[in-house]
Structure formats: structure tokens, C-alpha cells
Amino acid sequence: MLKKLDWYVIKTFLGPFFFIFSVLFFIFIVKFAWQQMEKFVGKGLEWYTIAELLFYLGINVVQLVLPLTILLGSIMTMGGLGERYELAAMKASGISLTRIFAPLFGLIMLMSVGLYFFGDKVMPFSQQKARTIFYNILQTKPAMNIKEGIFIESIPGFQMKINKVSGENSEKLEDVFVHQNSPFGENTMTILAKKGNLAPDKKDNRYLKMELYDGIAYSDNVKNKNQEERLRQENQYTKFDTLNYYIDISDILNSGKDEDPGGSYKYLDGGGLRHLIDSLNGDYKKYYKELQKNTFNQNYYFAKKTKEVDSVNTNMIFDLKEYSVTDKDRILTQAVQMVNRDQENLNFTQQEIINREKLYSKVNIHYQRNFSYAVTCIIFFLIGAPLGAIVKKGGIGMPVIISIIIFVIYFIINFSAENMAKNGNLDPTIAAWAANIIALPFSLLFCYKANQDSEIFNISVYVDPIVKFFSKFRKTNKIEEHSRYQ
């Protein structure tokens, strides 16, 4: 049961806590909004739509703000109690430091649990809301992501460059370049136009209707044609006054619907993330097993042939001299093509493995982060409260400096470990917990030092034993020693 002293300690903590949380949340959300503002300002969007979208996108800063608030608030609270000698009075009355910390520790435990559920439930919901708003924006302003004078690839299957965008809904285009990306062996098209309009199709909003004026359309019809036929065909282009071109954007729209998570891990809660991790593990095992089997089948024949080569006489398996010039060229060309094909396949396989490992690391880190940030709150309290009791300084001077140093070091370690995991250099589970694992011993050390009333920031505590040790080996002057008795 909480006593009056416990309520007093809690009330002393909650005052600075709410003030610090409000200030830090405002700073972090403004910083995030400033970074994202250029994507939405000047696109014809209402200010409240931009504010709502930025709020839902930036609300995840709570996972950074809460641990820092607990760290700074605990240092200020315990430092203030020590500075006003209230902490000394409590100890003099027989109350241990652990008992003084107990009510705040219980409160921090509740905050940690709340932060976990915030990351598990609220953040996926906020990301889905932001995606819904963005989906509605795409329906009304499809050209919002177009930047003037820059090649963009946000529309699947196309590369576009538009030098000037105008109009209420950014629908008017000038100096348009559009290139249709097609698979190897398929027909392609490149369009240049002086002006154009871009708007959703009135009959089907899954398509963008691009109406272009006064331009040229270059086509490359290579489908079902061999190399010789492709070389012989003439350049094909068509001049037009008006050209209507329809672009399928259903993939973009589907990625913005609430009902369709699109396989994105950021919209999943803990249960969904666990299921996704299990699915990725199963898919990767199947992929690596098939890759191993295909690699073995492709190289088994050549491995057998390699054993037949005489390493002493270096006799060739077959002699090119026995073939005609045409056959020699054909054989050598095929050999070069096979080597290039194998190199491309290996490069593709390597990149595929890297991408799969990165995705698995990102999903696993995102899943573990909800737990690790909750534990971070507890560790930061175990660091901040003892430090405040040792420093005995309240206010916003020394506590702020100490908090910023600890916060910066902690999250440098955290983000460095996560980047190493995403690059395949560290296990993602270890990366998510690395900063907590490193900080935990220091938190326990600070608690021990505070309970023993040790002065860990007094340099003489560390220097004096060293000086005393080396003074034993210093030779004393006998004349000076006897002069004291003369």
C-alpha cells in the first residue's frame, strides 16, 4: 500500500515528467514535420490534411521521447530531493534508497507496459491511417509525387520526367518525357510531348489518363524477333497532336488501402509480425534448398568433365581446329554468352539473398523493438534515479547535460547495431537488444554506488589511490627527514 511519502515522491516526479514529455514531443514532431514538409507543401493540399498526415506518420517518436523523458525526469526528481536535503532526511529516518525508488519503479514499469502496447497496437493503427489519407490524396492528386525536372520511378513500369507542373491539382504538365519499362524481349515505347494533362480516369480510378499534346512517340517493336531482324528494322516513330495514354496505378492504390496491408510489416501488430517471421523463415529455407539443388544440377556435369582433363598434358576435351571458321565463331560466342549468363545469374542470386536477409532483419528488428524500447524505460530509470541521488543537482542544468550524453551514446549504439543487422553483419535479435545489454551493467553499477553513497563524479576518489600506490616507491631524502628533529 502506498504511503504519503510514496505519493510525495510520485507527485514530485510527475510534474517534471509531463513538462519534459510535452517539450520533447513537440521538438521531435516539429523536426520530423520539417523533414517531411517539402513532400506535401505546395501540392494543393489543405493545411489540416497535411497536419493530420504528419501527425500519424510522426507519432512513432513517442518510442524515443518516453525513455528520454524518464531518464531526464528521474535525474531531476532525485537530484532535486538531494539538493533540498529531503533525500538525506529520508535516509536519516531509516528509509533505504531502494525503498525510496520503489514507488517510482512501479510507475515506470506501468509506463513500460504502456509503451509496449503503444508500439504493438497504436503505431500500426497510425500507419494505416496515414496510408488511408495518402490513398485519398492519390485519388484526387495523382501528380503529387512528381518533382519538376527529376526522373521518377514511383509509377510501376514507367520512368517519367516533367520539367513543369501547374494547375490546382497539379494536373497540367509541360515538357513531358515518358519511357515505358518492359521485360526483356517485349516492345517498348518512349514519348516526348510539349504539354499534357494528368488526371484519374473518370470511369476507373485504377488508371491515370495522361493526355499529351504536340509530341513524338518512339516505339521499339522487338517482340518475337531475332537479333538480325531487330538490326534490320527501321526506326519507328509517330508524330501526334493528341495522344491519350492510360497508366495502371492499381498497385500504388492497393498499397494505400486499410483493408490490404500489402505485406508491409509496419502495419502489423505483434501477432502479425510473428506470423510473418515464421513465413519468411519457411520461405527462405525452401528458397535456399532449391537454390542448392539447382546449383548442384547445373555444375555436376561440368564437374565430371573437369575430372577428365589431364592436368599434366593439358589435353583439350575437344579441339577447335577440327571445326570450320563459322563453327569456331559460333562455339566461342556461345561460350562467352554462357559465361556472361552464369555471371548475371550469380549476381542476381547474390542480390536476391541480400534483399531477403535485409527484409528478414528489418521485420525481426521491428518486432523486437517494441520489447526493447519498453525495457529501455526501466534501464533509463535505473540509470537516472541513482545518478540524481549521487549528483544532488535538480533543475535543468546538470541533469540535462547528463541525460543528453547518455541518450546520444545509447542510441548511437542502438542504431549502429540495427544498421549492422540490416547489412547482414549481426543477428537482428542481438542488434535490437545490444544497447540494453551494454547499458544494463552500468545501471546496476549506478544503483550500487548510489546505495553506498559513493562519489563517482569526484575525481579525487579515483586519483588518490593511484597517487598513494606510486608514493610507496618514491625515495625519501634522508637529510630532509632528519632536519625535522634538529
Image (tube, rainbow, N blue to C red):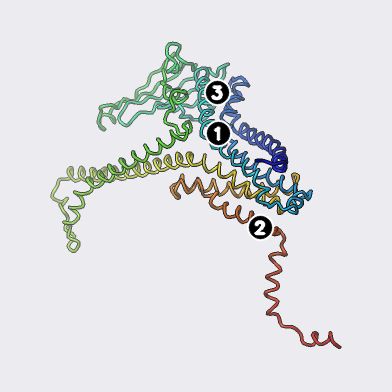
2 or 1: tag closer to the N-terminus: 1
Q: Earlier in the sequence, mark 3 or mark 1?
A: 1
Residue at the left extreme of this rendering: 322
At numbered mark 3, what does the secondary structure look like: helix, strand or loop?
A: strand
For mark 2, does the 10 Å Cα neighbourhood hold few (<14), some (14 to 19), or many (20 or more) residues? some
Corner quadrant of residue 347? top left
Mark 1 belongs to which amino acid?
Phe
Picture quadrant where residue 444 is located: bottom right
Q: Nearer the viewer, mark 3 or mark 1?
A: 1
Secondary element type, mark 2: helix
Q: State if disc 1 and disc 2 touch (CB < 8 Å).
A: no
Q: Amino acid at mark 3?
A: Lys
Occupied quadrant, residue 118: top right
Q: Crowding at label 1, few (<14), some or many (≥20) Cα neighbours within 10 Å? A: some
Marks 3 and 1, how far apart in space?
43 Å
Per the rendering, the mark at residue 164 is 3
Q: CA distance from mark 2 to mark 1?
A: 34 Å
Residue at screen point 51% across, 22% down: 143
Residue indicated by mark 2: 449
Which badge, 3 or 2, comes first in the chain's sequence? 3
Does 351 sit left or right of 33 as displayed? Answer: left
**Rendered position, 60 above or below 215:** below
Classify residue 309 as left or right of residue 421. Answer: left
Residue 118 got which mark?
1
Which of discs 3 and 2 lies nearer the camera? The answer is 2
> Residue at 44% of width from left, 42% of height from top?
361
Q: Residue at x 58, y 16 (%)?
A: 168
